Image: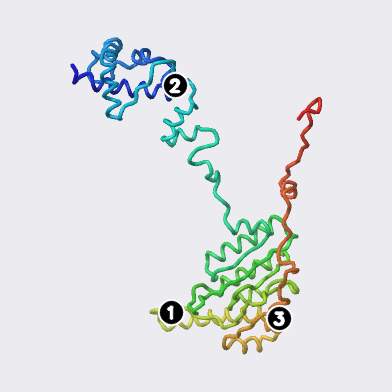
């Protein structure tokens, strides 16, 4: 009999402890009523259901209490009224170890400071001020983003200016390895001329090759370089041909020559130099600092603190007005009370 009572008594003590800490779950009832509400299927044998189990528990109460206190693995509530407050100190101590329960505590929880929505990415934040930043070589993924942003700004407001910051090595890496087609730059250039917005260009860091062409494509008088930026002009470079037939190499050579002519024509138009001079200057890499780039006609000014190279950032009320939100003043209640 003793061997059979122990598991049941342990379950009873655990249930009574939970009923004290979580009164709404247990029904806010006393010890005897909890025992009578236990399901008939509890345990392997139905003989310990309801009154039988209660009588056994009362008979073995003193001995089991001492054994539980000695073992330290059971907690038996003291006799008296059950605490029905789910936010009492003891209930919080018991429930605090469960992460789902901690979310029920007012002002607490393991996810209290987690953001409710994903943070915006940096290009989206810059786009709010109509800024486009080219900070990588001109590969298809970069071109897709730049063209999309330009078209979006033209769609939102065809009269506001766009600002393009450039720190790119063009269609190649810094070590000279070709990573993109020359058409990546011409697609950005064509989009700049298509949208019709005023374009401010700012060279910061480096602007090599096709990136220098984009730098020169801004509106006249609105092309800038930072004081320590560098621009460089060079011929279009051919990627490794691999195993190709001679006729395929010849076809590729004609395509690169066509891209070079387009590159030279655009630079001649933007800088005011003749096609012959541009073609001669790019036979070897031509490096220019900010002052040399101004003298060459690639840019117009060195940017300083007072230069307009960013659109005016709207205030909070300005964003609300553009979004169509109407601010209403709260009326004071009768009697002047607040």
- Residue 239 location (% of width, % of height): 47, 78
**Residue annotated with mark 1:** 241
The 10 Å Cα crowd at callout 3, few under 14, some 14 to 19, many 20 or more, is some
Q: CA distance from mark 2 to mark 3?
A: 80 Å
Q: Is 235 placed above or below 124 here? A: below
Report helix, strand or loop for mark 2.
Answer: helix
Mark 2 or mark 3, which has the lower sequence index?
2
The quadrant holding residue 312 is bottom right
Q: Residue at x 52, y 76 (%)?
A: 172
Mark 1 or mark 3, which has the lower sequence index?
1
* Label at residue 192: none
Between residue 1 and residue 143, name the one nearer to us. 1
For this view, does 205 lie left or right of residue 309?
Answer: left
Q: CA distance from mark 1 to mark 2?
A: 78 Å
For this view, does 128 lie left or right of residue 41?
Answer: right
Q: Residue furthest right?
A: 335
The 10 Å Cα crowd at callout 1, few under 14, some 14 to 19, many 20 or more, is few
The 10 Å Cα crowd at callout 2, few under 14, some 14 to 19, many 20 or more, is some
- Residue 310 location (% of width, % of height): 71, 63
Mark 1 or mark 2, which has the lower sequence index?
2
Q: Residue at x 52, y 41 (%)?
A: 112
For this view, does 209 lie left or right of residue 326?
Answer: left
- Residue 4 location (% of width, % of height): 20, 19
* Label at residue 294: 3
Report helix, strand or loop for mark 1.
Answer: loop
Q: Is 99 placed above or below 314 here? A: above
The quadrant holding residue 228 is bottom right
Between residue 7 and residue 160, name the one nearer to us. 7
Q: Residue at x 71, y 81 (%)?
A: 294
Q: Is 282 placed above or below 197 here? A: below
**Residue annotated with mark 2:** 23
| Quadrant of the drawing holding the C terminus | top right
């Amino acid at each position: 009999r003793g061997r059979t009572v122990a598991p049941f008594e342990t379950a009873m003590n655990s249930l009574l402890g939970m009923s004290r800490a979580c009164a709404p779950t247990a029904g806010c009832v006393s010890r005897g009523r909890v025992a009578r509400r236990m399901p008939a299927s509890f345990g392997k044998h139905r003989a310990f259901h309801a009154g039988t189990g209660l009588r056994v528990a009362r008979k073995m109460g003193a001995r089991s209490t001492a054994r539980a206190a000695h073992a330290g693995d059971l907690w038996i509530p003291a006799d008296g009224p059950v605490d029905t407050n789910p936010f009492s100190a003891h209930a919080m101590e018991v429930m605090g170890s469960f992460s789902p329960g901690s979310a029920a505590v007012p002002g607490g929880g393991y996810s209290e400071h987690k953001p409710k929505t994903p943070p915006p990415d940096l290009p989206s934040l810059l786009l709010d001020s109509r800024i486009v930043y080219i900070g990588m070589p001109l590969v298809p993924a970069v071109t897709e983003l730049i063209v999309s942003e330009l078209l979006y700004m033209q769609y939102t407001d065809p009269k506001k200016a766009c600002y393009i910051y450039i720190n790119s090595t063009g269609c190649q890496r810094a070590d000279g390895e070709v990573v993109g087609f020359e058409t990546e730059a011409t697609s950005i250039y064509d989009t700049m001329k298509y949208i019709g917005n005023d374009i401010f260009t700012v060279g910061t860091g480096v602007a090599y090759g096709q990136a220098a062409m984009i730098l020169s494509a801004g509106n006249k008088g609105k092309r800038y370089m930072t004081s320590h930026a560098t621009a460089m002009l060079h011929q279009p470079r051919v990627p490794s041909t691999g195993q190709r037939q001679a006729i395929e190499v010849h076809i590729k050579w004609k395509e690169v020559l066509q891209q070079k002519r387009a590159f030279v024509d655009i630079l001649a138009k933007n800088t005011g130099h003749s096609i012959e001079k541009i073609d001669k200057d790019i036979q070897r890499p031509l490096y220019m600092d900010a002052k040399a780039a101004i003298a060459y006609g690639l840019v117009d000014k060195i940017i300083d603190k007072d230069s307009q190279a960013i659109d005016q950032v709207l205030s909070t009320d300005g964003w609300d007005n553009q979004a169509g939100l109407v601010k209403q003043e709260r009326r004071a209640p009768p009697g002047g009370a607040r």
